[in-house]
Amino acid sequence: METGTVLLLCALHSFGFALFHLGFWRLFDWPRTLQATTRPNRAILQIANLQLVWVFAGVGLLCLLHPDALAGTPLGRAVLAGMSIFWLIRLAAQLVWVRIHHPLVHALTALFACGAVLFAWPLLRA
C-alpha cells in the first residue's frame, strides 16, 4: 500500500476517534453520570477528553496536509512513531483495565491495534 494511502487511513482513523470522543457526553450521559465522583475528577476527565479531541483532529490534519513531511523527515517520522506508541499504550491499557467482554469493546480494541499498525506502516517502509 502506498504511503499516501496509509496516511489517509491514519487521518480517517484520527478523525473518527475525534468524533467518537466528542460523543462521550451523550454516549456516557455526562455530566449526570459523573456526579458520583468529585468535582476535580469530573473536570479532569472532561478536560482530558477535550484535549484528546484536539490531538486527534490535529494529527488527522497533519496526515492530510503534510503526508510527505510525515513520511520523509525526522520530525514527521517521530510524530508517526509517537502516534504508533500512543495506540500501543492505549491497546495495553484496554487489555489491563477494560475487562468487559462485549463486541463493541472488542471492536475498539481492534481499532487501537489498527492505529498502532497504520502509524507504524510508513516507518517500516523506509
Image (tube, helix red, strand yellow):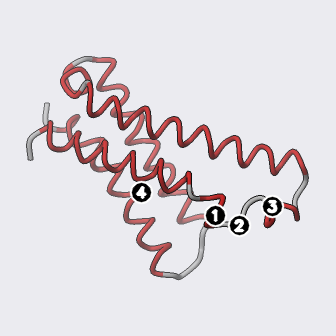
Badge 1 vs badge 2, beta-carbon distance below 8 Å: yes
Depth-wise, is mark 1 or mark 4 nearer the camera? 1
Q: Name which of mark 1 and mark 4 comes first in the sequence.
A: 1
Instruction: Give me the C-alpha separation between circle 1 and circle 2.
Output: 5 Å
Q: Name which of mark 3 and mark 4 comes first in the sequence.
A: 3
Instruction: Give me the C-alpha separation between circle 1 and circle 4.
Output: 22 Å
Determine whether, in the image, residue 30 is placed left or right of residue 114: right
Indicate the secondary structure of the residue bearing disc 4. helix
Q: Name which of mark 3 and mark 1 comes first in the sequence.
A: 1
Depth-wise, is mark 3 or mark 4 nearer the camera? 3
Instruction: Give me the C-alpha separation between circle 3 and circle 4.
Output: 25 Å
Amino acid bearing label 4: Phe
| Label of residue 112 in the image | 4
Q: Is residue 2 above or below residue 33?
A: above
Determine whether, in the image, residue 51 is placed left or right of residue 74: right
Instruction: Give me the C-alpha separation between circle 3 and circle 1.
Output: 12 Å
Bin the neighbour count of mark 1 within 10 Å (Cα to Cα): few under 14, some 14-19, many 20 and up.
few
Return the residue at label 2: 29
Return the residue at label 1: 26
- Residue 118 lies, in percent from the top left, at 27, 47
Badge 3 vs badge 2, beta-carbon distance below 8 Å: no
Q: Residue at horizontal 24%, vertical 48%? A: 9
Q: Name which of mark 2 and mark 4 comes first in the sequence.
A: 2
Indicate the secondary structure of the residue bearing disc 2. loop
Q: In this view, does 36 lie above or below 70?
A: below
- Residue sticking out furthest to the left: 2
Depth-wise, is mark 3 or mark 2 nearer the camera? 2
Q: Residue at horizontal 55%, vertical 53%? A: 21
Badge 1 vs badge 4, beta-carbon distance below 8 Å: no
Return the residue at label 3: 34
Q: Is residue 93 above or below residue 105?
A: above
